[in-house]
């Protein structure tokens, strides 16, 4: 996407995402990508979330990105905990190799 935007920066004036959690999974990545888009004079727009390009809007956008990262991190932790629990209980958490099913 960045390559395309860089090559077509005169034709692209905004990148539209469903919400910021679909743009990047980590806050740091979000901020880096956002800065690259801003350097190309391309606006990031969310369909479901509203934020402006002023000080308050940037804070809201960063908080939304941080909440998306928190949600992703918590899901990952729960998945790992469930897999460890299943392994400790003697259940296989992966598909067994061919011939062992």
Image (cartoon, helix red, strand yellow):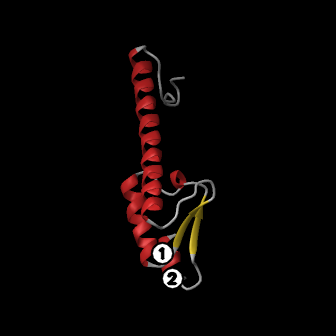
Q: Residue at x 39, y 23 (%)?
A: 84
Secondary structure found at label 1: helix
Residue 97 horizontal/vertical position (percent): 49, 30
**Residue 77 numbered tag:** none
Residue 3 horizontal/vertical position (percent): 48, 75
Residue behind mark 1: 3
Q: Residue at x 43, y 15 (%)?
A: 90
Residue 32 horizontal/vertical position (percent): 38, 64
Q: Residue at x 38, y 16 (%)?
A: 88
The correct choice, above or below, for 19 with respect to 98 in the image is below
Q: Residue at x 42, y 65 (%)?
A: 33
Residue 23 horizontal/vertical position (percent): 51, 57
Residues under numbered marks 2 and 1 in contact, where contact means CB atoms less than 8 Å apart = yes
| Direction bottom: furthest residue | 10
Relative to 51, 77 lies left or right: left
Residue behind mark 2: 7
Secondary structure found at label 2: helix
Q: Neighbour class for label 1 at 10 Å: few (<14), some, many (≥20)?
A: few
Q: Nearer the viewer, residue 96 or 31?
A: 31
Q: Neighbour class for label 2 at 10 Å: few (<14), some, many (≥20)?
A: few
Mark pair 2, 1: CA separation: 6 Å
Quarter occupied by the C terminus = top right
Q: Nearer the viewer, residue 33 or 87?
A: 33
The correct choice, above or below, for 32 with respect to 91 in the image is below
């Amino acid at each position: 996407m960045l390559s395309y935007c860089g090559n077509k920066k005169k034709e692209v004036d905004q990148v539209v995402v469903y919400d910021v959690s679909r743009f990047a999974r980590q806050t740091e990545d979000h901020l880096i990508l956002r800065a690259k888009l801003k350097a190309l004079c391309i606006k990031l727009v969310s369909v479901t979330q509203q934020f402006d390009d002023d000080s308050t809007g940037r804070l809201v956008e960063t908080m939304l990105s941080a909440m998306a990262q928190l949600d992703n991190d918590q899901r990952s932790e729960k998945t790992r905990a469930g897999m460890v629990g299943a392994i400790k209980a003697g259940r296989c958490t992966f598909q067994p190799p061919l011939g062992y099913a």
